[in-house]
Image (cartoon, rainbow, N blue to C red):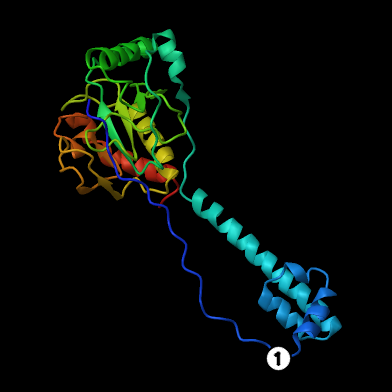
Amino acid sequence: MVPPGGTPHIADRPDPPDSRTMPVLRGPRRARERRTSRIPGAAHLPAAARALLGALPGLAAVAALFLCAGGVERAADEQSAAPAAATGRHTAPRPDIVPRSVWLGGAARAQPAPRYDDEVVAVFVHHTDTPNGYDCADVPAILRGVYQGQTGARDWDDIGYNFVIDRCGTVYEGRAGGIDRAVTGAHTQGFNHRTTGIAALGTYTAGVPVPDELTDAIAAVAAWKLGESGTDPRAKVALVSSNGLSRFAAGATAMLPAVAGHDDGYATSCPGAALAARLGDIRETAARLQGRA
């Protein structure tokens, strides 16, 4: 398997400090310093505020201090509350997920440490191309077969999908690394970074019925994972191709759906025509789960 590539995350740089100086207030410096030193709490104020207080007579300075401190506290509260409101505005709850330890047990092979991205901005929907007529109680054994096929015959380091969902709507943890983390998958050539791979257990080619329980569960996982980065499931996002085996040259930026089919990034019939036809519904359901109009 070709290791997935990507672009490094570049941290935002702070704005350069303002080189302009504040105008100097009139009055003897030492007198202002003595005056402000007698005002409780003045030492914690900015220099400009201390200078202003120093220019005021005693009680007026104390009154101004309380007004200033109250304003600073209110501004700090507003600033600290704003990010929380913005973060929680379009998030969705994490659905119930069966951990890999339940279905994999002692069948796990030795593997390298997981790799991680900074966030998830897109999900790719797949199908496993396995039989559909299964009993949902048998899914753990079926998943072990998928895992053994990918880590054995294909010699992958782990199952490629981050999540697998059966026709009953049960969500299973796939690739190791932590359900709540942005684990780099091995599910889509060129676009494993900053994405999550969700596989529908079965084969969903043209004419095959797609259970609502399945699509609802896919939407729930997509809403949750994309909500953590503030991504609208109905939007398009910029993804950088890591290799030319995808539909895009290595290093090219592709605008792809935030909820994409495997065939959006790679020349394949996956996730099957029947499931691909339901992606629009999945996007809309995921958006509603995020509380979007």
Instruction: Decide which of 204, 211 is in the foreground and name it.
Output: 204
Q: Report the number of discs.
A: 1
Return the residue nearer the eye: 93 or 156: 156
Residue 75 in percent (x, y) is at 63, 66
Residue at label 1? Answer: 26
Query: What residue is at 65 percent from the left and 86 percent from the top?
Result: 24
Q: Quadrant of residue 5?
A: top left
Q: Give the camera-side residue of 260 and 284.
A: 260
Q: Is residue 85 left or right of residue 152?
A: right
Q: Residues within 10 Å of mark 1 (few under 14, many from 20)?
A: few
Residue 164 position, x and y percent, is 35, 24
Residue at image coords 17%, 26%: 205
Residue 213 image offset from top left, x and y in percent: 36, 27
Asked whether residue 74 is in view, the answer is yes
Q: Is residue 250 left or right of residue 74?
A: left
Which quarter shows the N terminus? top left
Q: Residue furthest front?
A: 30
Q: Quadrant of residue 37?
A: bottom right
On screen, 135 above or below 74?
A: above
User: In the picture provided, is 139 more to the left or to the right than 271?
Assistant: right
Residue depicted at 85% across the width and 82% down the height? 58
In the image, is residue 59 above or below residue 147?
below
Instruction: Give the residue type that dot 1 points to.
Output: Arg
The answer to whether any part of residue 135 appears in the image is no
Q: What residue do we see at 50% from left, 54% from top?
A: 86
- Image coordinates of residue 93 in percent, x first then y, are 49, 38
Quadrant in which residue 40 is drawn = bottom right
Q: Secondary structure at mark 1?
A: loop
